[in-house]
Amino acid sequence: MKIFIDSADVDEIQQAYKWGVIDGVTTNPSLIKKAVDRRVGDGKKLDMKGYVAQILEMSKGNPVSLEVTERSAEGMIAQGKKLFEMFNPIAQNVNIKIPVNPALADDEASHFDGIKAIRSLAEDNIPVNCTLVFTPEQALLAAKAGAAFVSPFAGRVDDLLRKNAGMSFEKSDYYPAEGHDTEGGLLHDDGVLSGIDLVRQCVDILDYYGFETEVLAASLRNPRQVREAALVGADIATLPFTVIQGMLKHVKTFEGMNSFMNDIVPEYAEL
Ligand code: G3P
């Protein structure tokens, strides 16, 4: 499974590359805002073009997702092309993130604008990462439209299930991949039992029909979810910096290291 870092913070991205385990980067408007807020003080403005270029350069050879901010098909296509033309020459590693459905509510007539934009950009050989996927059927339509990646948002599915059930939780709390059993039966969102179950269903459908589209498990909030995304066959997991850090921690590893260090004899250390 490939591991991407879900961050727009150049320091985090650079550090993760130095660890040698990162295969790409995903950004979104919220992550860009977080990075900008961290850097910009006293009304100073960030050179956004230079900043994005830095991320692309340090990711040479690895894909980087840049998300559109427009919502109409025409707007997303134009902005997607512009971002690609502006940034892809830097390191030939840009893909454009398009929401599977850019409608803000159920009463709009724009539900297929994301799919139209994916189709159009894919026909122009611009790789698309289809984002905000919450159902396997959204993933199927995005794959049919030619998306290079589909991004099911695992953690946000778990948020929804817990919220609907009136449970209190922290964003990073583990939610069982097999679902949460209650007196009224397993919690589910239209047959999706958990975020990881959504990832699994996307993987199964796209594999079954031989789509080249890769499943990029997103909105992963803890190391156990990463393990489960790997177990259900996600092609990629995109992870916040802190989750990557958390993947190496275990109390018995620390304990073992302490005891090994205490047992070092000088004769061996001097070898
Ligand atoms: O890649 C999508 C991701 O950034 C969303 O994560 O934790 O805000 O649901 P989260």
Image (cartoon, rainbow, N blue to C red):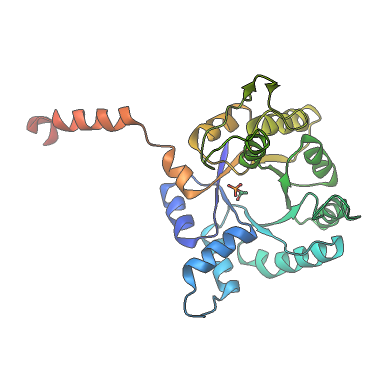
Q: Give the image location of residue 3, x and y in percent.
A: 55, 42
Q: How many marks?
A: 0
In the drawing, does residue 56 fall left or right of residue 211?
left
In the drawing, does residue 189 fall left or right of residue 181?
right
Q: List the single residue furthest toward the left.
A: 266
Q: Report whether residue 271 is seen.
A: no
Given residues 55 and 255, the one toward you in this image is 255
The residue shown at (81%, 46%) is: 146
Quadrant the N terminus occupies: top right
Asked if 82 appears above or below 247 in the picture, the reply is below
Q: Report whether residue 42 is seen.
A: yes
The residue shown at (55%, 33%) is: 225
Given residues 107 and 210, the one toward you in this image is 107
* Image quadrant in which you'd find residue 166: top right
The residue shown at (80%, 44%) is: 142
Q: Give the image location of residue 44, x and y in percent.
A: 51, 80
Given residues 28 and 18, the one toward you in this image is 28
Q: Give the image location of residue 69, x and y in percent.
A: 72, 64
Asked if 93 appears above or below 249 in the picture, the reply is below
In the drawing, does residue 115 fall left or right of residue 152?
right
In the drawing, does residue 241 fall left or right of residue 159?
left
Q: Give the image location of residue 271, x and y in percent.
A: 13, 34
The residue shown at (49%, 56%) is: 13
Q: List the single residue furthest toward the right.
A: 109
